[in-house]
Image (cartoon, helix red, strand yellow):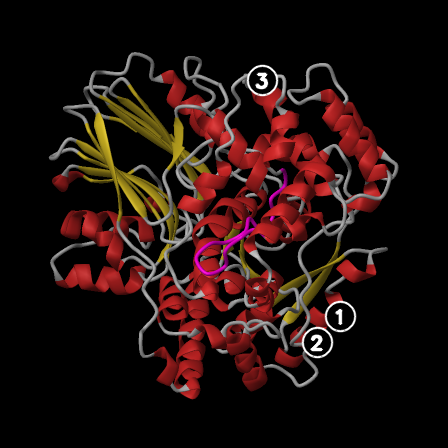
Amino acid sequence: MCGIVGIASITPYPDRTWLAVARDTLIHRGPDDAGEWWTQDGRVGISHRRLSILDLTPMGRQPMHLEQRGLSIVFNGEIYNFIELRQELQNLGYSFQSQSDTEVLLAAYAQWGSKCLSRINGMFALAIFDAPHQQLFLARDRAGEKPLFYYLSNGVIYFASELKALLTHPFLPRRIDPEAMDCYLAMGYVPGDRCLLAGYNKLPPAHALRFQLQTGTADVWRYWHLPQLDSNDSTTDETILLNELEALLEDAVGRQLVADVPVGILLSGGVDSSLVTAMAVRHSQHIRTFSIGFPGHGNLDETPHARLIARHFGTEHTELVAEPTTAGLLPILAKQFDEPMADSSMIPTWLVSHLIRKHCTVAIGGDGGDELFGGYSHYSWLLGIQHKLAYIPSWLRYGLAQASEYWLPVGLKGRHYLQRLNVNLDNGLPMTANYFDATQRRRLLSNHYGYPIVSEKIFTDRIPAQNDLLQRITRMDFESYLPDDILVKVDRASMLNSLEVRAPLLDYRLIEFAFGKVPSHLKATKNSKKILLKQLTDRILPLEFDRHRKQGFSIPLTQWLKSGPYRELFWDTLDNANCLFNRKFLLGLLKGQDGGYSNSERLFALVIFELWRSTYNINF
């Protein structure tokens, strides 16, 4: 795992010192080595921070070059099928000097150009300077496991793994994009190619970008799409599907165990991580598993469930004890996350990564299982109410939703449920989180004239055109919530600790299997979740395994806000003259939390935002 930074310009770039400064802000992504390279004319510069995973020798250093073809690359990620690609390319006449996947990736581009992306199985963000064509090529993996930000203006493009690297540039702007801000307050993250800072973009998952040095222009395109569900899915044999799932998962796990450094498995004892562990022991007799205990918070302690799986499969199991977190961690996370996100589970994610890194450089987790196979509780809830809503007149549902938004206190139990009643589940979707509705956002930013209320339309425009409700919401979550929340959280928290986290369930073959072959009734119903995955647990996990347990990765934030350092930090941050938001509304949220309303995650969203804005000196 690594960090990449670069620049390409239609004219020679006058100050080369910035590139090294930007690169070294990413030292946490690559503490083992650093490299930098410029074209002779000074129009293109690329740089790299290295976390050595494959080929630990200097032969694996980046930037890497294929001089006879005029190609240079910096690359963040792992290519899991690089051994097969290497053999295929050798048969075509290529020779290799290293044992790294980076050199294979560079040769693949030399042979197939941008079409090489369809041959790659991996997680990646890459940049290749193609001298013969005078272009810079950027690309990001299908699921969006690895990040890539860019800023394009006046014939110059800047790119980096993390936004903070770009913000080291003294002349790039630092102003909030109001529409992205509205999305953040509504959804808890900034979706798609948008960025919370005006003028910056994220390259979306499964997209590539080509910047032309002659014109200073760029075009962006999508190179991969989720497959449509096979129209004959209703006649598909469940045993055949189960066999294919088992084979794909076993192969994906085996590929992701390959590394020249210690690898461990994040074993929570849930369905996904337990299946990953079961597959890992098929490939190696020496598998290390890790689970985390939270003393004093019994419902968050997963160690007994993990212990059962570890004992059954005979892994070398380590139980780590989470130390009490301090409020001083939040400013550190606000700085690391580039854009704020309203997900307090970033705290335990960082904590787990910090502890695992003392033992391993690579960790394998179970991310993606919920989106691919129907694991979230709201899937069953929506399926359960879909037909019931048809019996409630639309005018009544609209009236209840509007009345709850205007008149019920923020954080009151049932308020969000009433607001969801106005959604047409035949073709639409509700915002699952909906941290602040339109009325609340107007009140929050009442001191900013002309603040746009656009997130509802942006959300609606992103809803996949699927008649089947479960297909619609799982695809929506895969293309929005997964890359813009879950994978951001995992990447930033793990890389802050120089730990690489891999996700076998996001192998693109499993993604295509889940969305192209598995019918909705084998994913979730109003009474069941992860149906096909749980059938696989019946086949390979111990009988005592709790198949119905669903424990989200969370913290006792409500309890922490009753007293102590977290409460003090929240009040000091929000009850502050420099705070961007309406003070009266904020005091209402804070007092409502004390009065028993459920506002802890909303307050977390605002605190993280203000800490981030202060850290990077961001203006509205």
Q: Are marks 2 and 1 in contact (CB under 8 Å)?
A: yes
**Which residue is at a point 62% across and 74% down the rendered structure image?**
527
Q: Which residue is mark 1?
A: 304
Question: Which amino acid lies under the numbered mark 3 shown in the image of this protein?
Answer: His
Residue 433: in magenta span? yes
**Which residue is at a point 59% across and 43% down the rendered structure image?**
493
Q: Is residue 286 visible?
A: no
Query: What numbered label is drawn on residue 308?
Result: 2
Q: Position of residue 249 (x, y in %)?
A: 44, 72
Query: What numbered label is drawn on residue 448?
Result: 3
For label 3, count other residues whose C-alpha is less than 10 Å away and answer few (under 14), some (14-19) or many (20+). Answer: some
Q: Is residue 498 above or below residue 475?
A: above
Question: Which amino acid lies under the numbered mark 2 shown in the image of this protein?
Answer: Leu
Q: Nearer the viewer, residue 230 or 83?
A: 230
The residue range painted magenta reads 422-436
Separation of marks 2 and 1 at Cα, in angstroms: 6 Å
Which of the marked residues, 1 or 3, is nearer the chain's N terminus? Answer: 1
Separation of marks 2 and 3 at Cα, in angstroms: 55 Å
**Which residue is at a point 60% across and 60% down the rendered structure image?**
392
Question: Which amino acid lies under the numbered mark 1 shown in the image of this protein?
Answer: Pro
Separation of marks 1 and 3 at Cα, in angstroms: 51 Å
State the quadrant of the C terminus: top right
